[in-house]
Image: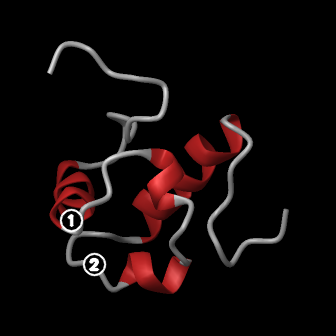
Amino acid sequence: MSSHGDDDIPSGIGAPARRALAGAGYTTLPQVASMTEQQLLQLHGMGPKAIRRLRAALAERGLTLADQET
């Protein structure tokens, strides 16, 4: 995977969390933005650190999780 788009899940997210997202069909940040924190936490491999990094990556693109106030 040599080419990554701006909306791809950032590589700074741990491998277990990336696999959990991909396994659930979420491969881009806009897709992740449709989820709530609770939904993310239900994915095996997703923890608080990964969620913090996802929130930061979403914020850089002007996005938030579905349950986060804008």
Where residue 41 sits: x, y (%)? 39, 81
Report the residue marked by disc 1: 20
Above or below — where is 16 with respect to 56? below
Q: Secondary structure at mark 2?
A: loop
Identify the mark nearer the N-term, 1 or 2: 1
Query: What residue do we see at 85% from left, 62% from top?
Result: 70
Query: What residue do we see at 20% from left, 78% from top?
Result: 44
- In the shown orientation, is residue 69 left or right of residue 47? right
Front position in the image: 25 or 17: 25
Query: What residue do we see at 74% from left, 42% from top?
Result: 62
Q: Amino acid at mark 1?
A: Ala
Report the residue marked by disc 2: 43
Give the CA separation, mark 1 to mark 2. 6 Å
Q: Amino acid at mark 2?
A: Leu
Where residue 25 sits: x, y (%)? 24, 62
Where residue 55 sits: x, y (%)? 60, 55
Query: What residue do we see at 32% from left, 21% from top?
Result: 4
Which residue, as the protein is rendered here, is positioned at the far right? Answer: 70
C-beta proximity under 8 Å, tags 1 and 2: yes
Front position in the image: 54 or 25: 25
